[in-house]
Image (cartoon, rainbow, N blue to C red):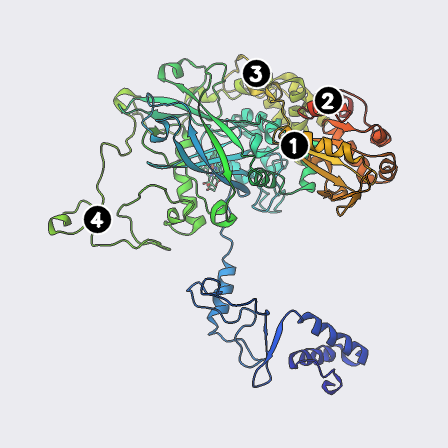
């Protein structure tokens, strides 16, 4: 058979064809053989083929010109690689040789390219930037970064979802991590917070249970992200201390529009310590310059299909285009006396101090101005640890914080494989670092000299003695004599006020607008509707009865179950003054800055109107994104063709903050027959967005069920003003909320 093959085929291709022919048995025809042969040749055409003395072939990528030592491909040992296409074999058809160190190194490294992902907060996106102090805090803290207004400290900030794996979607209903590493001149300070100011549990001993319950279920490995499943609600319903956080998690806070439009919180009460050792309690808040904004639930769900990487892309693109995300740092400062008068405990991470009770003092700004160079080396390998604090900052006895001080160091050692993870560039301090810790896996420094212990007197023998303690400037805890008395019996208990699980949940509920309350009630219904254990939803509602009877009734109605009796409260809830600062809608910053406006065009679109609109959007600080039936081109009214930024089917309107429909009569007629266009308009309306349109586009709006309201406008200034808002009033007309 080999003789019948085209002469142009090399030996390997011939061998392959003969093998395939044998496998196919008798049914192979000459035409088949010829076709296989041609395919084999086509497969290798981008390679140059060299023939060796024994007739064997060597395939290579064609040379790309002269090379230098800088551009040689090398092994990890720096040994130049002559051939990156073929493994070393014993003869052209023989076994691969064990001695092929190039192959072995490459494959072994590949096998280990994934480290165990974070057990929580596995999916994250991060950026570099700086923190700039605007107000000195030298009276309350000796921390160097809080001394001189104008001083800047480099930071690396990682945002994350909690429940999903590293490859999960960006927009599930979930808490978002907000972790900041400050590389200060006194060492690294990690403020590892969330976008919600309270937490589910009060004591770290419950954390593994909480996370086991919320992550994908142990036997079936779903759902991949989010809390709408049986085990989470089973656990939450049995722990009334989760109630306050559940109110936040069921609110729009858990479906942010952008990582750039979320608040961040240190959550725990920390301490500042001044140069005299005096302690002041402090709570940390990040306030986004673009305001807090969320999606609506249907939009968040559809975004999971439209763009898995919606938040990651948004952060990357904003930074890449010079629209640097920015937050203000606010602090709430108070002393023991203030704390002792509050009707809740400041050591309880399920409680806030409302801004109306203790206003924020704005002391600095955080700016993210550089995308990572390498996702793995930086975003994956960054290792935050709440125990990383600098002189001038200290912990409190918050039992959740105390447990965290152990957990993170431990997890980093197993996640990054070595106690030397602090030497990775993203984790290394940017100030001098020297001590007597030595050796260990992946030791990357080469310490010199004999001194690896302290104290030593090697300097008396003329040798280098190494670093020494620095009592004057080194880290010291706050002065206990002026602080609390910290002795007691060894007990497994919680402090008395920790037993109040409902007062602040009620405070949160009462601080929301009607529309926000409807979203919360509907989220409870949605999540509990996914719980297949019939005994669990009534238990959740029994807890909600202690928050607000109306809320509990709406959730029970939404599920079609009877209203249960209230769960007997460990401590009766009290009515606290509502806090308007807790509502997103009451504090919306009306701007289109940093937003994306989708513009739907087609053949025949008015060229001048399109240019004018794009110009106005850019001038307002937003980004226009042109969507057309074909991405390659649309022919405008002036006969010129334009390229679209996205094709209609791949660019649904949930990707945008507001939409403009710039269609001619001809374009409208065409798109009336395109379901994706009708859905585009219908979703924009349903997601309460502003819709600007040409008169000619009216039939498309009608077909999509758009009813005129304040958010439906022409294409002028009215549209730009409307684009800065969401139209909450519209929702009652189009959605049956709980
Ligand atoms: Fe945690 C990661 C935030 C309680 C144990 N946590 C992690 C991250 C954030 C938070 C943002 C991701 C950091 C990154 O981007 O790499 N965690 C919180 C907040 C909490 C909290 C705001 C409560 C106020 N965490 C908490 C407790 C424990 C942990 C009580 C254990 C006792 N957290 C971890 C961890 C993680 C982590 C297992 C997983 C990956 C990592 O640390 O680096 O150690």
Secondary structure under the numbered disc 4 in the rendered image: loop
Of pointers 4 and 1, the one earlier in the residue sequence: 4
Q: Is residue 692 above or below residue 216?
A: above
605 or 288, nearer to the observer: 605
Write down the residue under mark 1.
Answer: 618
Write down the residue under mark 3.
Answer: 580
207 or 318, nearer to the observer: 318
| Front position among marks 2 and 4 | 2
Q: Is residue 12 left or right of residue 702?
A: left
Is mark 1 in CB contact (under 8 Å) with mark 3?
no
Q: Is residue 275 above or below residue 414?
A: above
Please give the label number shown on residue 718: 2
Graded by Cα atoms within 10 Å as few (under 14), some (14 to 19) or many (20 or more), the crowding at tag 2 reads some
Of pointers 1 and 3, the one earlier in the residue sequence: 3
Quarter-of-image position of residue 729: top right
Please give the label number shown on residue 325: none
**Picture coordinates of residue 247 (x, y %)?**
58, 25
Is mark 2 in CB contact (under 8 Å) with mark 4?
no
Write down the residue under mark 4.
Answer: 453
Using the numbered discs, state the Cα–Cα distance from disc 3 to disc 2 in whole angstroms: 29 Å
- Residue at coordinates 79% horizontally, 79% vertically from top-left? 28
| Front position among marks 2 and 1 | 1
Of pointers 2 and 4, the one earlier in the residue sequence: 4
Using the numbered discs, state the Cα–Cα distance from disc 2 to disc 1 in whole angstroms: 16 Å
- Residue at coordinates 49% horizontally, 68% vertically from top-left? 104
């Amino acid at each position: 058979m080999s003789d019948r093959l085209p002469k142009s085929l090399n030996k390997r291709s011939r061998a392959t064809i003969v093998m395939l022919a044998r496998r196919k048995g008798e049914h192979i025809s000459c035409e088949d053989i010829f076709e296989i042969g041609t395919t084999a040749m086509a497969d290798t055409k981008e390679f140059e083929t060299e023939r060796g003395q024994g007739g064997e072939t060597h395939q290579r990528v064609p040379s790309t010109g002269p090379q230098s030592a800088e551009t040689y491909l090398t092994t990890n040992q720096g040994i130049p690689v002559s051939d990156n296409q073929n493994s070393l074999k014993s003869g052209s058809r023989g076994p691969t040789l064990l001695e092929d160190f190039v192959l072995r190194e490459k494959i072994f490294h590949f096998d280990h390219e994934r480290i165990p992902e974070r057990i929580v907060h596995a999916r994250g996106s991060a950026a570099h930037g700086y923190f700039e102090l605007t107000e000195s805090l030298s009276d309350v803290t000796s921390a160097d970064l809080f001394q001189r207004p104008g001083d800047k400290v480099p930071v690396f900030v990682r945002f994350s979802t909690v429940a999903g794996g590293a490859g999960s979607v960006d927009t599930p209903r979930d808490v978002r991590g907000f972790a900041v590493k400050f590389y200060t001149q006194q060492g690294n300070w990690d403020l590892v917070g969330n976008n919600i100011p309270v937490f589910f549990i009060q004591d770290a001993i419950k954390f593994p249970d909480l996370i086991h319950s919320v992550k994908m279920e142990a036997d079936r490995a779903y759902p991949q992200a989010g809390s709408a499943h049986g085990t989470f609600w089973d656990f939450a319903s049995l722990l009334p201390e989760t109630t306050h956080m559940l109110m936040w998690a069921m609110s729009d806070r858990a479906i942010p529009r952008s990582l750039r439009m979320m608040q961040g919180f240190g959550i725990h009460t920390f301490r500042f310590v001044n140069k005299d050792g005096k302690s002041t309690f402090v709570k940390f808040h990040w306030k986004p310059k673009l305001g807090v904004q969320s999606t609506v639930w249907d939009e968040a769900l559809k975004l999971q299909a439209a763009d898995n990487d919606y938040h990651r892309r948004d952060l990357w693109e904003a930074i890449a285009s010079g629209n640097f995300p920015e937050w203000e740092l606010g602090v709430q400062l108070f002393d023991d006396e203030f704390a002792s008068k509050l009707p809740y405990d400041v050591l309880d991470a399920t409680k806030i101090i409302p801004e109306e009770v203790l206003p924020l003092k704005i002391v600095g700004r955080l700016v993210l101005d550089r995308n990572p160079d390498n996702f793995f080396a930086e975003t994956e390998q960054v290792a935050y640890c709440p125990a990383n604090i600098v002189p001038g900052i200290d912990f409190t006895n918050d039992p959740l914080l105390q447990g965290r001080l152990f957990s993170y160091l431990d997890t980093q050692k197993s996640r990054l494989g070595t106690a030397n993870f602090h030497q990775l560039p993203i984790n290394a301090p940017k100030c001098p670092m020297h001590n007597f810790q030595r050796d260990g896996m992946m030791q990357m420094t080469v310490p010199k000299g004999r001194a690896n212990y302290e104290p030593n007197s090697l300097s008396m023998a003329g040798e280098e003695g190494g670093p020494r303690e620095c009592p004057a400037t080194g880290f010291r805890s706050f002065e206990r004599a002026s602080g609390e008395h910290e002795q007691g019996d060894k007990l497994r208990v919680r402090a008395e006020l920790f037993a109040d699980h409902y007062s602040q949940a009620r405070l949160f509920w009462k601080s929301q607008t009607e529309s926000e309350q409807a979203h919360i009630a509907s989220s409870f219904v949605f999540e509990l509707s996914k719980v297949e254990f019939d005994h669990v939803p009534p238990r959740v509602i029994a807890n909600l009865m202690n928050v607000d009877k109306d809320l509990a009734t709406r959730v029970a109605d939404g599920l079609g179950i009877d209203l249960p009796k209230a769960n007997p409260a460990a401590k009766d809830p009290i009515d606290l003054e509502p806090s308007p600062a807790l509502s997103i809608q009451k504090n919306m910053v009306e701007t289109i800055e940093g937003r994306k406006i989708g513009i739907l065009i087609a053949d025949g679109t008015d060229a001048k109107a399109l240019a004018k609109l794009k110009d106005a959007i850019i001038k307002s600080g937003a980004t226009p994104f042109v969507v057309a039936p074909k991405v390659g081109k649309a022919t405008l009214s002036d006969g010129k063709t334009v390229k679209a930024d996205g094709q209609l089917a791949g660019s649904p309107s949930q990707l945008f903050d507001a939409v403009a429909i710039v269609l001619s009569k001809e374009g409208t007629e065409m798109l009336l027959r395109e379901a994706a266009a009708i859905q585009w308009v219908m979703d924009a309306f349903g997601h309460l967005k502003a819709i600007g349109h040409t008169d000619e586009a009216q039939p498309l709006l009608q077909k999509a069920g758009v009813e005129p309201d304040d958010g439906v406008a022409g294409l002028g200034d009215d549209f730009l003003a409307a684009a800065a808002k969401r139209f909450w009033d519209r929702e009652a007309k189009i959605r049956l909320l709980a």
